[in-house]
Image: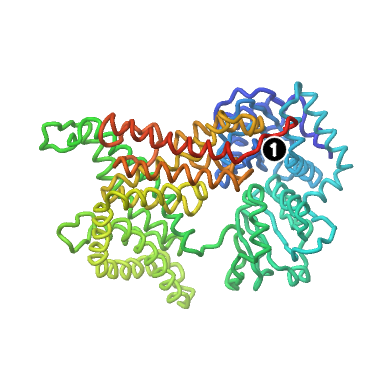
């Protein structure tokens, strides 16, 4: 079946009116409904949204492919929408999407339909194809471009092979790498990930074979002999795949979207065997293909990511209360304001108070699944309430929460192991009685014993950092600022930001001001560079630079990733230099900020009034221009053809 049998003029919108992700989904679903492709638009939209909740279908490079298999689909179809301005679709690269292909598959779609849908997904990996689509002037021209692409690959059989079978050329070096791709619906991401991995492997001369677990079944299945010979295996999946066969091999487990957006990094890791040796748990019938529940960083980030809404929401509400006066929330102060007191109670007395227990609860849950959550929360609460030190009202704070989370997680794993051999008749009591009682008891007792000394350590560290001054403080700012730009939202960036939050919880506001200002610099610096040195950037990069202004101003460091991915050797060192400059200046100027997020939108909450706000802006702009000028000096002019 040809794609143009599914994509027709009456399912195309050349100029979307939508301004948000939800509006895009509604508008495209409406187009399918008007074309007679749906039985129930409301149900289909619900199914599309359910798929988005599993992982974004905004794959980056301006593309989004929302899709679903649904009983609400009358006839398999594809709707296409285009937005010249771009729409925030929570894409993997953090950039707005312009091309939207909504795939509607019936619950019982046959192989012909599914193969045609997956072929479209692989076509979108071709940059020339995407450019032609975005430049099309009519609906018929869009269809002609798709037809021409189908003719180019000489029919569906060859097109399908391109999505699922690695190149046959034997490279001279590089070892044998295998991969498996799978997404929940098995329509788009499965084949796009395979296509991207195959394409990059072919260009680099890497011997790769990819198995796809799609809706039409497993294609290009990996054989036992191939697995035995493989140096490493990449499992890029958001759904369950057969993992027992990989026992004893180096296995990289990640999300299917990472294979589309970070194909080179995954191949590099596979070549270097930079992955743990997989040990299959024979007590489980199947394994999830996503990242394994192991590793300090993964558990920590699970806690931090779930804690952030409490930190951001509570922190900003506390900071807003200071607009009414530094002591406006204090009933005994002449500045007292009832609304300011309300903001402070909601933000500090409730949201911020829950920060550490939530951190600990989700760390423990990452380690031990749901049974770890309750003991983690209790351990975190004990960390901030049982001090044993009169002058320390906040307990061991962030440090205690980290320890409580990991303690509760591993205590729960131990309890689960202890009760693994109880009679089957008592199995139902484990999650509701045995696990919570013993996990909470053991975690609670240990935390009550160790938290007083932890509190003393935490207050000592906070006091030491507060006592720093002059050169030492500037060096700390230099280090934290540079860390914010090393990996733009990755582990190093998150480590610096998490430290800033910990110090914010300890009432030291300089560190939060430093990491936020430094985090704004990389995207702002590249945005300025695209304006100052236009000849050094392609037209798409200059367009991305306009978006980077907004992302940088909003403290979204990830806005620099497209530039860093395209030219890491020049962009990353320049960004680090600029961010480090800003970090050092913020510390030098002794600027504090009580809000944990928000960028320029919370700059009015900087301590010290207008003078400090001005100095804060100067620090941010100074670092941004350092980055922009370095990039401009290091990059070469693009060719006229670019």
Give residue 75's quadrant in the image.
top right
In the image, 184 versus 169, the foreground residue is 169
In the image, 432 versus 601, the foreground residue is 601
Residue plotted at (80% across, 33% down): 146
Is residue 74 shown left or right of residue 348? right
Q: How many marks?
A: 1
Residue 589: horizontal and vertical position, in percent?
A: 31, 40
Is residue 233 shown left or right of residue 369? right
Give residue 243's quadrant in the image.
bottom right
In the image, 608 versus 330, the foreground residue is 608
Residue plotted at (47% across, 42% down): 578
Give residue 114's quadrant in the image.
top right
Q: How is the image coloured?
A: rainbow
Is residue 572 shown left or right of residue 6? left
Q: Is residue 594 visible?
A: no
Is residue 199 shown left or right of residue 590? right
Residue plotted at (23% across, 54% down): 394
Q: Quadrant of the C terminus?
A: top right
Q: Secondary structure at mark 1?
A: strand
Residue 88: horizontal and vertical position, in percent?
A: 56, 33
Q: Farthest front residue?
A: 633
Q: Quadrant of the N terminus?
A: top right
Residue 422: horizontal and vertical position, in percent?
A: 45, 77
On screen, residue 416 above or below 162:
below
Q: Is residue 405 visible?
A: yes
Residue 451: horizontal and vertical position, in percent?
A: 26, 65
Residue picked out by circle 1 = 103
On screen, residue 202 above or below 372:
above
Q: Alpha-carbon neighbours of circle 1 within 10 Å: few (<14), some, or many (≥20)?
A: many
């Amino acid at each position: 079946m040809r794609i143009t049998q599914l994509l027709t003029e009456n399912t195309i919108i050349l100029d979307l009116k939508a301004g948000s992700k939800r509006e895009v989904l509604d508008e495209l679903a409406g187009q399918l409904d008007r074309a007679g492709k749906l039985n129930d638009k409301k149900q289909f939209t619900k199914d599309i949204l359910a798929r988005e909740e599993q992982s974004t279908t905004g794959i980056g490079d301006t593309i989004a492919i929302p899709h679903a298999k649904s009983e609400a689909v009358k006839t398999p179809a594809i709707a296409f929408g285009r937005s010249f301005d771009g729409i925030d679709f929570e894409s993997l690269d953090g950039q707005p999407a312009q091309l939207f292909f909504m795939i509607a598959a019936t619950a019982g779609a046959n192989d012909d339909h599914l193969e045609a849908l997956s072929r479209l997904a692989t076509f979108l990996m071709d940059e020339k194809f995407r450019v032609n689509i975005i430049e099309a002037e009519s609906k018929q021209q869009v269809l002609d471009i798709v037809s021409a692409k189908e003719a180019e690959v000489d029919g569906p059989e060859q097109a399908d092979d391109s999505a699922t079978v690695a190149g046959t050329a034997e490279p001279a070096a590089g070892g044998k790498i295998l991969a498996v791709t799978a997404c929940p619906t098995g329509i788009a991401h499965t084949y796009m990930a395979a296509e991207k991995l195959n394409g990059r492997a072919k260009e680099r001369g890497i011997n790769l074979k990819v198995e796809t677990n799609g809706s039409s079944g497993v294609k290009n299945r990996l054989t036992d002999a191939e697995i035995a010979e493989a140096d490493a295996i990449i499992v890029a999946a958001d759904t369950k795949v057969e993992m027992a066969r990989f026992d004893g091999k180096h296995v990289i487990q990640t999300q299917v979207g990472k294979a589309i957006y970070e194909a080179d990094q995954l191949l590099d890791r596979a070549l270097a065997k930079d992955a743990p040796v997989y040990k299959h748990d024979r007590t489980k019938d199947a394994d999830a293909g996503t990242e394994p529940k192991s590793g300090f960083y993964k558990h920590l980030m699970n806690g931090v990511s779930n804690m952030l809404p409490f930190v951001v929401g509570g922190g900003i509400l506390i900071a807003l209360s200071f607009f009414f006066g530094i002591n406006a929330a204090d009933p005994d102060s002449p500045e007292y304001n009832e609304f300011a007191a309300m903001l402070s109670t909601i933000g500090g007395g409730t949201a911020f108070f829950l920060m550490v227990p939530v951190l600990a609860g989700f760390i423990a849950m990452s380690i031990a699944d749901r049974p770890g959550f309750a003991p983690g929360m209790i351990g975190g609460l004990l960390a901030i309430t049982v001090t044993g030190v009169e002058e320390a009202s906040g307990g061991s704070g962030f440090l205690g929460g980290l320890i409580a989370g990991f303690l509760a997680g591993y205590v729960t794993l131990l309890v689960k192991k202890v009760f693994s051999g109880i009679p089957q008749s008592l199995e139902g009591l484990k999650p509701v009685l045995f696990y919570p009682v013993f996990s909470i008891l053991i975690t609670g007792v240990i935390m009550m014993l160790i938290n007083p000394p932890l509190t003393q350590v935490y207050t000592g560290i906070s006091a030491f950092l507060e006592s720093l001054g002059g050169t030492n403080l500037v060096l700390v700012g230099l280090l934290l600022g540079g860390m914010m730009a090393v990996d733009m939202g990755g582990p190093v960036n998150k480590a610096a930001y998490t430290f800033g939050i910990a110090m914010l919880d300890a009432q030291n506001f300089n560190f939060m001001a430093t990491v936020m200002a430094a985090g704004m610099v990389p995207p702002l610096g590249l945005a300025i560079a695209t304006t100052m040195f236009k000849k050094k950037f392609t037209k798409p990069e200059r367009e991305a630079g306009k978006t980077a202004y907004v992302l940088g101003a909003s403290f979204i460091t990830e806005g620099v990733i497209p530039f860093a991915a395209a030219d890491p050797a020049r962009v990353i060192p320049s960004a680090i230099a600029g961010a480090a400059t800003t970090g050092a200046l913020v510390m030098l100027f002794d600027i504090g900020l009580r809000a944990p997020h928000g960028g320029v939108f919370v700059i009015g909450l900087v301590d010290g009034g207008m003078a400090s706000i001005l100095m804060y802006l100067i620090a941010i702009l100074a670092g941004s221009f350092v980055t922009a000028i370095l990039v401009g000096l290091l990059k070469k002019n693009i060719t006229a053809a670019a």
